[in-house]
Image (cartoon, rainbow, N blue to C red):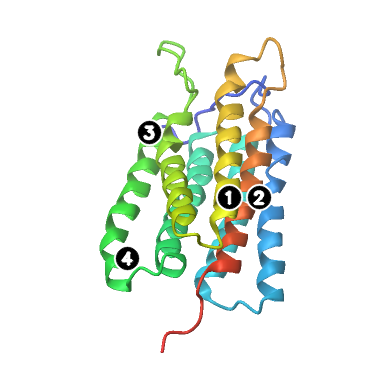
Amino acid sequence: MDWSATIDIYCERLGPGFWAEPVNALSNLAFVAAAIWGAVAARRRAVTHPVAWVLIVMAGLIGVGSFLFHTYATTWAALADTVPIWTFVAIFVLAAMRYIGGMAPARVARISGFVIAGAVLTVAFLAMTEGSDPSAAPDPLNGSGQYAPALLALMIFAIVTRWRKHPSANWILAATGVFVLSLAFRTLDRNICDAIPLGTHFLWHLLNGLMIGLLLQVFLRTADLRPAR
C-alpha cells in the first residue's frame, strides 16, 4: 500500500496542493464546534464521567482527522480521517446501550467484541480501497454505503427510544434526520461537479457536525452517569 498516494475523489479538489479543498477542509470546524458545545454542556451539568469526555474529545478529533484528509489527501490521511469516526461510533453505540438503554455491563461487554470488530474491519477496508481508480466502475453511492451500519444503528435507536417514550427520543430522531440529509449531500458530490464545481461534500461536514453535536447532547442530558453503588 502506498501511504503517500494522492486521493482525488471530491469536486472541489482540482490539484494536489494542501489548500486545494479549502471549503471541505475548513468546514470541519463543525466537528470542533460540536465538541465545544459538548464540553460547555458537560461543565454546566458537572459531568465528570470519563466516557462522556472521551466522546467529546473524539468529536474534536473527527474534525482534525478530516481536515488532514482534505488537505494532504493521501492514504495515511484517509486513515487519520476514518479512525476517529469509527472510534466515536463504536464508543457511542456501547455507551448508549449501557448508560441510556440501561443494559447490564456483562451484556454490553459481550456485544462490544462485535461492535469493535466491525469498526476495525470497516477502517481496514476503507484504508485499502480509498482513492480514485479510473478503471473501476463508478460507485453510484459515492462511497456512502460504508455508513449504512451507522444509519441503521441510529434508526433502530430512534425507534426504540420512541417506543419506550425515552426523553432522548426527539434528540435521536433529529440526529437521524440530519444524518440522512448529510448522506444525501455526500452521495451527490461527485455527480454534480459540472453544475456545482464546489460540490456538496462540505455540507456533509456541516450536517455531520450538527448530528454529532446532537448525539453528545443526548448523552449528556439523558444518560445515567451516576457512580455505580
Sequence-first tag of 4 and 2: 2
Q: Please tell me in which quadrant of the rendered image residue 24 appears.
A: top right
What is the secondary structure assignment of the residue under circle 1?
Answer: helix
* Quarter of the C terminus within the rendering: bottom left
Camera-nearest label, 3 or 1: 1
Badge 1 vs badge 2, beta-carbon distance below 8 Å: yes
* Closer-to-camera residue (13/167): 167
From the top left corner, tell me how far across and down residue 114 is, in percent.
Answer: 28, 53
Rounded to the nearest angstrom, the CA distance separating label 3 from label 4 is 30 Å
Rounded to the nearest angstrom, the CA distance separating label 3 from label 1 is 20 Å
What is the secondary structure assignment of the residue under circle 2?
Answer: helix
Q: Is residue 80 above or below residue 97?
A: above
Residues packed near mark 3 inside 10 Å, few (<14), some (14 to 19) or many (20 plus): some
Badge 3 vs badge 4, beta-carbon distance below 8 Å: no
Residue located 49% across and 43% down the image: 82
Q: Is residue 151 above or below residue 37?
A: above
What is the secondary structure assignment of the residue under circle 3?
Answer: helix
